[in-house]
Image (cartoon, helix red, strand yellow):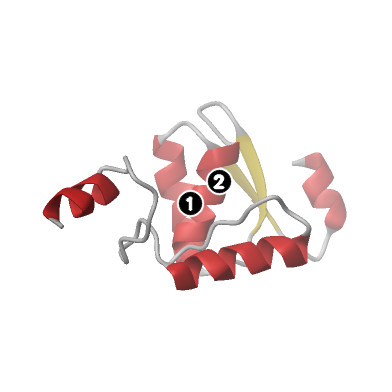
Amino acid sequence: SADHAASLFNLQTFGNVYSRISNPTVAVFEERMAALEGARSGLAAATGQAAEVTAILTLCSAGDHIVSASTLYGGTHTLLHVNLKKLGIETTFVHPDNPDDFKTA
């Protein structure tokens, strides 16, 4: 019914709405990946960039400093160098061939 659908989309009733909110295929994937990794739960993202942004913004906030390898996918480099800088999160890029550079950054 329309009322049931409204309660699903308003997150008042648990159930699948087959959108970005929930669907059984993604739920099974998340549960199985969590089990493989020994985690309590998991979160699937539609793209690698969505996964990166979710992970970074969960762990970092204004004033934090990220040390990253300089050899990155272009979109990731832009995220770290441009977009996160606007949020007050600084990134230092180092060459991955020298592990000591990570320590000194």
Residue 32: x and y, percent?
A: 66, 68
Mark 1, residue position = 53
In this picture, residue 1 sits left or right of residue 40: left
Query: Among all residues in the image, which is located at the extreme right?
Result: 100
Asked if disc 2 and disc 1 are in contact, CB closer than 8 Å, the reply is yes
Query: Among all residues in the image, which is located at the extreme top?
Result: 63
Query: Among all residues in the image, which is located at the extreme front?
Result: 1
Mark 2, residue position = 56
In this picture, residue 46 sits left or right of residue 102: left
Residue at 74% in and 41% down? 105
Q: Nearer the viewer, residue 44 or 87?
A: 44
| Residue 47 in view | no
In this picture, residue 10 sits left or right of residue 83: left
From this view, report whether residue 85 is shown above or below residue 41.
Answer: above
Q: Amino acid at mark 1?
A: Val
Residue at 78% in and 57% down? 38
Residue 74: x and y, percent?
A: 48, 67
Quadrant in the picture for the N terminus: bottom left
Residue at 39% in and 37% down? 86
